[in-house]
Image (cartoon, rainbow, N blue to C red):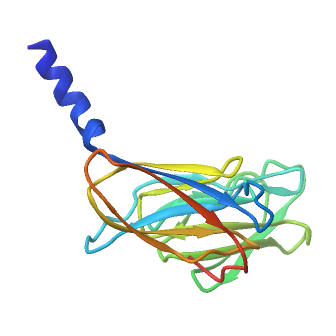
């Protein structure tokens, strides 16, 4: 009986597929802060009911690149001892948080896929990106690598976004339990996910 229950608990992870993605620049160096995501073909995905944080410390946005799924609520705490005025004029999300300290009461809901460039009207050096993707299968590269776990069998379009570099998407077919490795060599800049 215990073996049967253990099998039931482990079964989804035994049959889920994984994609490991390596991202390199034109010189073959590992690229960090690239957003890697897999969009399933022919399936409608529910909106995220997640939360995320875009912090402000030492007059910088932290992290510099934040990846979220469509429907995510993002809060913008200001942990500096000065006021900030956060804004975006990006097509995917236009908003302003006028001069404030602390944390605004209401988070911003990111309800459209795309790249959201952030700035501060008071501190010109402050900039960051929120990459909003229409899939729950996403990760940000560290040392040039990211892993997308728990994918169901099926066809996916795998994409990579980076602020300065870009790559053509790839379509892959996954079977239950597959473990696939892809390498993207980045070139020209991306406009949006």
Question: Residue, x 43% and y 57% (percent of image)?
Answer: 137
Question: Residue, x 17% and y 29% (percent of image)?
Answer: 8
Q: From this view, report whether residue 120 is shown above or below residue 101.
A: below
4 sits left or right of 130 in the view: left
Question: Residue, x 26% and y 54% (percent of image)?
Answer: 175
11 sits left or right of 163 in the view: left
x, y percentage for residue 179?
A: 40, 47
x, y percentage for residue 169?
A: 51, 75
- Can residue 171 be seen in the rendering of this structure? yes
Q: From this view, report whether residue 18 is shown above or below residue 119.
A: above
87 and 99: which one is in front?
A: 87
Locate residue 177: give its quadrant: top left
140 and 48: which one is in front?
A: 140
182 sits left or right of 86 in the view: left
54 and 134: which one is in front?
A: 134
- Can residue 107 be seen in the rendering of this structure? no
x, y percentage for residue 147?
A: 51, 48
x, y percentage for residue 139?
A: 55, 54
Residue most extreme to the left: 1
Question: Could you tell me which quadrant the N terminus lies in?
Answer: top left
Question: Residue, x 65% and y 59% (percent of image)?
Answer: 23
Question: Could you tell me which quadrant the C terminus lies in?
Answer: bottom right
């Amino acid at each position: 009986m215990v073996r049967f229950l253990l099998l039931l608990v482990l079964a989804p992870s035994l049959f889920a597929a994984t994609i490991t993605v390596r991202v390199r620049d034109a010189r073959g160096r590992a690229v960090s802060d690239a957003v890697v995501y897999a969009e399933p073909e022919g399936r409608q995905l529910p909106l995220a009911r997640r939360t995320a944080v875009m912090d402000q410390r030492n007059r910088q946005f932290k992290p510099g690149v934040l990846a979220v799924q469509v429907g995510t609520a993002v809060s913008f705490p200001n942990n500096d001892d000065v006021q900030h005025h956060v804004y975006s004029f990006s097509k995917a999300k236009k908003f302003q948080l006028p001069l404030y300290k602390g944390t605004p009461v209401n988070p911003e809901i990111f309800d459209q896929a795309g790249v959201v460039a952030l700035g501060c009207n008071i501190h010109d050096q402050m900039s960051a990106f929120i990459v909003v993707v229409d899939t729950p299968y996403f990760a940000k590269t560290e040392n040039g690598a990211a892993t997308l776990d728990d994918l169901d069998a099926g066809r996916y379009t795998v994409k990579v976004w980076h602020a300065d570099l870009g790559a053509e998407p790839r379509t892959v077919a996954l079977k239950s339990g597959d473990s696939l490795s892809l390498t993207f060599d980045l070139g020209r800049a991306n406009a949006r996910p």
